[in-house]
């Protein structure tokens, strides 16, 4: 399975619903048993100073550490600054599958079920 981005607001709801548990650098889908290694990341929505994207970052999910190292990015909440450019971002965790998946369980179906939870849709409006 590919990497999965979990926005922080979605993670907060899933943790409150006890559907996800974050243990250090690992995220676990509690009912299905899937385990992921995680790192802090942001989804880059738009550049808000000029609307231009000279670095080709808009629409991407990038680990925070990589943005800081490669672009000297400063990230605070939903904002990121790189030199003279300001971006709107969505903070969260980038998850990569870790270990062997549970037998007879469909990871894509499990993630789809999480995204379709009524409590999640209601909270995110």
Image (spheres, helix red, strand yellow):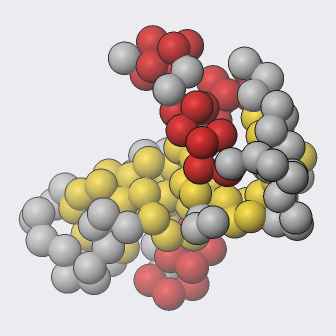
In the depicted structure, whether residue 119 falls above or below residue 45 = above
Please say whether residue 123 is visible from this viewpoint: no
Question: x and y percent of residue 87 in the render?
Answer: 30, 59
Seen in the image, is 121 located left or right of residue 33? left
Please identify the residue farthest to the front as the structure is shown: 104
Query: Which residue is at 73% across, 20% downward?
Result: 16
In the depicted structure, whether residue 58 falls above or below residue 69 = above
Q: Nearer the viewer, residue 27 or 104?
A: 104
Quadrant in which the N terminus appears: bottom right
In the depicted structure, whether residue 122 falls above or below residue 101 = above
Question: x and y percent of residue 42 in the render?
Answer: 49, 58
Q: Nearer the viewer, residue 50 or 29?
A: 29
Query: Which residue is at 67% across, 59% downward?
Result: 95
Quadrant in which the C terminus appears: top left
In the depicted structure, whether residue 12 falls above or below residue 121 = below
Please say whether residue 64 is visible from this viewpoint: yes
Query: Which residue is at 75% across, 28% downward?
Result: 19
């Amino acid at each position: 399975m590919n990497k999965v981005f979990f926005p922080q607001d979605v993670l907060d709801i899933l943790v409150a619903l006890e559907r996800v548990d974050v243990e250090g650098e690992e995220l676990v889908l509690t009912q299905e048993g899937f385990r992921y290694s995680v790192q802090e990341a942001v989804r880059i929505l738009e550049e808000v100073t000029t609307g231009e994207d000279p670095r080709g970052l808009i629409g991407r999910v990038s680990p925070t550490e990589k943005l800081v190292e490669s672009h000297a990015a400063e990230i605070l909440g939903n904002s990121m600054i790189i030199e003279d450019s300001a971006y709107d971002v969505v903070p969260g965790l980038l998850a990569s599958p870790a270990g062997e998946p549970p037998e007879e369980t469909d990871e894509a179906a499990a993630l789809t079920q999480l995204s379709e939870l009524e409590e999640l849709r209601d909270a995110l409006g």
